[in-house]
Image: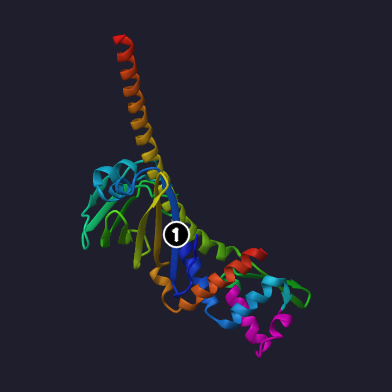
Amino acid sequence: MVKYESQLDSTFSALADPTRRAILARLAVGDASVTELARPFDVSLPAVSKHLRVLERAGLLTQDRQGRVRRCQLQASPMRAAAEWIECYRRFWSQQLDALAEFFGESQDTAEARQEKRDNDIKRKHTDGI
Amino acid sequence: MTLNANTPTEFSIRVSKFIRASRERVFEAWVRPEIRRKWWRTNRGEGPTTCEIDGRVGGKYLLKQIGSGAETPAGVEDDYEWVIEGEFLEFDAPRRLVFTWNVNHPGEPSGDERVTIEFHEAEGGTEVTISHEGILSSSLRDGTEKGWTKLLELQAEVLAQA
């Protein structure tokens, strides 16, 4: 879980800003150029570039330079890291519950086996008696 | 899995399972150390090395085990001794247990985590539901509260697209 922590920190910091969240939401629909990303926001291109660098550092997006045009692409893996962190805990509890079920499954089987043995013993005694 | 984003920085995990035994017996299996030892398992398939449970409101519990319950986190030795400890906030036999949850994660101070276990009578046995709630890590509390909520909102959207 330690592995995820610094990655999570930068992911969360990057997501703390509403403009950056809006940029990510836009990129979730598809790739976009820097100009396209800047359009809906009342900010300058340099300001958008700054947001993009923060998102890039957090590993949330990659930028491809095609000549003078920069295309941005969403990278969802840091979010997966956060989900995996929680998933790890979920698995922990699921496995404990499986172990608990197995414990009672086994002890019940043993109880049933004992009962069956008793039944057989009684039957045998009957048979022996006759 | 439920991700509860009502309160920023909080997470909530919920798992349930049907256990083929009476509520009383299942409850006992959690709170009586000699029974708990028999089924509580690490990822190495071993039981705890220490298991102390003071089953009452305000009572403490202590579990020590080599190897975690799930896979070993990156950067942690396989034979790391995990210490899980806490205090019972509710102790309502055989219905409900609420206790605090502290784990000695290396490099990650334990946050304010709590576990609730509910035991519901079901046909031929007991439905056990575990809820684990807490803060992902203390370092995330600084300036990133909103980030967490937004992350969860974005996550479904983003993962669906990815």
Residue B35 drawn in magenta: no
Q: Up-down: is A90 above or below A63?
A: above
**Residue type (three-letter) at the residue carrying disc 1:** Arg
Instruction: Describe residue B49's horizontal placement relative to residue B106 as left or right.
Output: left
Does residue A6 appear in the picture of this structure? yes
Q: Position of residue B122 (x, y in %)?
A: 41, 50
> What chain does mark 1 sit on?
B
Crowd tier of the residue under label 1, counting other residues whose Cα lies within 10 Å: few below 14, some 14–19, many 20 or above: some
The residues colored magenta run A34-55
Counting from the top left corner in percent of width and height, residue B155 is at: 58, 68
Please tell me whether residue B77 is drawn above or below residue A127 in the rendered image: below
> Is residue B13 positioned above or below A24 on the image?
above
Q: Residue B24 placed where, x, y %? A: 29, 48
- Residue B52 lies left or right of residue A3; in this view the side is left
- At horizontal 51% and vertical 66% (from top left) the residue drawn is A7
Between B161 and B76, the residue placed more toward the observer is B161
**Disc 1 on helix, strand or loop?**
strand
Q: Residue at x 41, y 48 (%)?
A: A97
Image quarter in which the C terminus of chain B is found: bottom right
Main SS category, magenta section: helix
Please tell me in which quadrant of the rendered image residue B112 appears: bottom left
Residue annotated with mark 1:
B14
Look at 66% across and 90% down and name the residue there: A42
Q: Is residue A63 visible?
A: no
Residue at the image position 51 percent from the left and 59 percent from the top: A84
